[in-house]
Amino acid sequence: MPKYKTLAGMKDVLFDDQKYWRYILAKIQETTDLFGYQRIDTPLLEQASLFVRGVGEGTDIVEKEMYIFEDRDGDMLALRPEFTAGIMRAYVQNGLHTMPAPLRVWTTGPLFRHERKQAHRYRQHSQFDIEVLGEQDPAVDVEVINVAWHLFSSLGFSSLRLYINSTGCPTCKPVYIEKLVDYFTQFKDQLPSDDQRRLQQNPLRILDTKEQATIPLLDNAPHITDYLCEACDNHFQKLTTYLDVLERPYTIDYRIVRGLDYYTKTVFEIKADGLGSQDTICGGGRYDGLIEQVGGRATPGIGFGSGIERIAAALAHLNIEPPAPPKPRVMVSYLGAEAKLAALKLVETLHAANIGAMLTPGDRSFKAQLKAANRAKVSFSIIMGDDEVANQQATVRDMENSQQTQIAWSEIVSWLQEQLAK
RNA sequence: GUGACUGUGGCUCAAUGGUAGAGUAUCUGGUUGUGGCCCAGAAGGUUGCGGGUUCGAGCCCCGUCAGUCACCCCA
């Protein structure tokens, strides 16, 4: 047994997974360039209070999932559990409100939440995240959804489900919550204990219940869309109109309730098949009050986070094979100490000419060296031995058809460039 | 945080309570400088860890850790 193992919920990303990551990150780069988003990176560590304030005191993330600790200076720090609060901090601190609005940014990197581990749910996971700051037009809401949709389409997804809802604003949300509490209070005695608790602590979460006893009651429960204030209702109407014009398929799901306190108006999720109960690969929404909470001037914002591990798992489930990463097509083998020196120099020369090449190290038998070349699936093996050194030549073996050619050292680069271009 | 299932070489899995094995991967050979196929050999394990029951535990019991499933939460 190994002495050291990854911590619970942590994971090594090995080579078979890396091909998905490489593919996903390349598509993220293309998509964000296409839509005009600029990259921003913020630190993994921030003052703990930033997240407590930003994400919300009563949320699960803050209450029981944050990695929080005192550092050597006695400050309370936290590993970021999400991106948005840190980006808002950066927006205020760097005076980014002086840049042309709306400000479109994206980022990617690891996030940390101490959750009960499960497949597709990790304590360290990575997300692709975008935020648009300084504009409340619902056209921006649609744009943000479109960034996600374009990314997923370009990755090869064809069957994702988009769910949208509105969570209202500080004007209408409390009114709705009151109606909701009134409604469920009638049935209080029928509610399972979990839902009775929710009724007290976070009534919106009842909408998300999995309790068999509660689900029938949801049918007649008040929908938030009937209680939105004029501004929120108008916003939501426009959002659906714009989505309809774009013929973007969506489902209005009044049960979407995001776990972070800061959301206002638009919220949305995108779900994939094959990931069990952890099937949300993208979730986000509007947060028009957040920047003010973090100490900036009132600024509207909207964004989403999308889990890279889950995107990769969904691609694998759908048998979507990422393109193979480029790799060296030349292996240099040698026989004898003198030829080894020539081989070392040749590999260096090939790299300088931007030709991917590897040496078979270890002074192994020639047979073993060719075997290694075979397994590396290179196109050419270059063989250096005493004869070659004496003649200032190399033997180049075409691994496909086993043809061998003698090439002068001075010609190797141009010869290979010509062959590899075919 | 709640409930349940699983844990044997790197990987996939065997082994009635009685000597821990196979396939695969790795390394080396099958005469002198030639890969893929085939053959042979080597190496690789305190059966996740700690207790208990037993003459004897990979197997039974308890605990713990890890993974998995559902809840919860969320990406």
Image (cartoon, rainbow, N blue to C red):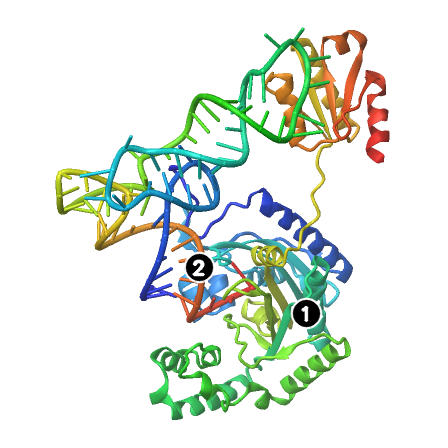
Amino acid at dot 1: Ile
Residue B33 vs residue A293, the one in the foreground? B33
Q: Secondary structure at mark 2?
A: loop
- In the picture, the disc for residue A130 is none
Quadrant occupied by the C terminus of chain A: top right
Visible residue check, residue A266: no
From the viewer's perspective, tell me whether residue A173 is left or right of residue B66. right
Tell me if residue A407 comes above or below residue A171 in the rendering: above
Which badge, 2 or 1, is on the more N-terminal residue? 2
Residue A131 place in picture, x, y as percent: 65, 64
Write down the quadrant of residue A76 in the picture. bottom left
Residue at the image position 55 percent from the left and 65 percent from the top? A279
Residue A35 place in picture, x, y as percent: 76, 62
Residue at the image position 73 percent from the left and 82 percent from the top? A241
- In the picture, the disc for residue A66 is 2
Q: Secondary structure at mark 1?
A: helix
Name the mark nearer the viewer: 2 or 1.
Answer: 1
Chain holding disc 1 = A
